[in-house]
Image (cartoon, grey):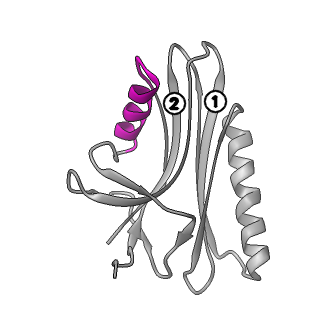
Amino acid sequence: MLPVPKKFFVTAVSAEGKSRLNAFDNALLAARIGNVNLLRVSSILPTGAEYDPDLQFPAGALVPTAYGSITSDVQGELIAAAVGVAVDPAGFGVIMEYSGKCSRDEAYRAVEEMLAEAFAKRGLSIKDKKIKAVEHRVDKVGCCLAAVPLWY
């Protein structure tokens, strides 16, 4: 049985690189998750998980992460990514992520609307939420990444 994560943080960053993969890797580094192995997870925050903006991971660790990303090599294109976490009064949470060819504000609003819908569908109320978003105007090859890494 896998342990249930107890900590998380929320991040949204952008980066450039010489290739799509390098742009993505550089965004991972900027997000402080570039030296770990991401295990992409769906969008549930375990009940009672605590927000820790200074969370650090050992190099090479397997880190459960909900994320959205977009990479583009179209010079001048505007790209964005956003991620949000909302928590109910009991501490149960939902994570929503978004990425697209849009502005930071559009990505932010998309995540905000998805969180509201997810909680309404579950019949829950939102006690607290954290949303981060970023936009990037592509120079050569750009990447936007928004993520919620989880830890034990």
| Quadrant of the image occupied by residue 76 | top right
Residue most toward the front? 1
Q: Position of residue 114 (x, y in %)?
A: 73, 59
Secondary structure character of the magenta stretch overall: helix
Q: Residues within 10 Å of mark 1 (few under 14, many from 20)?
A: many
Looking at the image, which is closer to me, 144 or 11?
Answer: 144
Residue type marked 2: Cys
Residue at the location (57% across, 65% down)? 43
- Contact check, label 2 and label 1, Cβ < 8 Å: yes
Q: Residues within 10 Å of mark 2 (few under 14, many from 20)?
A: many
Q: Position of residue 75 (x, y in %)?
A: 60, 12
Q: Which residues are magenta?
A: 16-31
Which residue is found at the position 32% from the left and 51% from the top? Answer: 37
- Residue marked by disc 2: 143
Left or right: 70, with 11 as reference point: right
Residue 140, above or below 107: above
Q: Which residue is mark 1?
A: 79
Of labels 2 and 1, earlier in sequence is 1
Label 1's element? strand
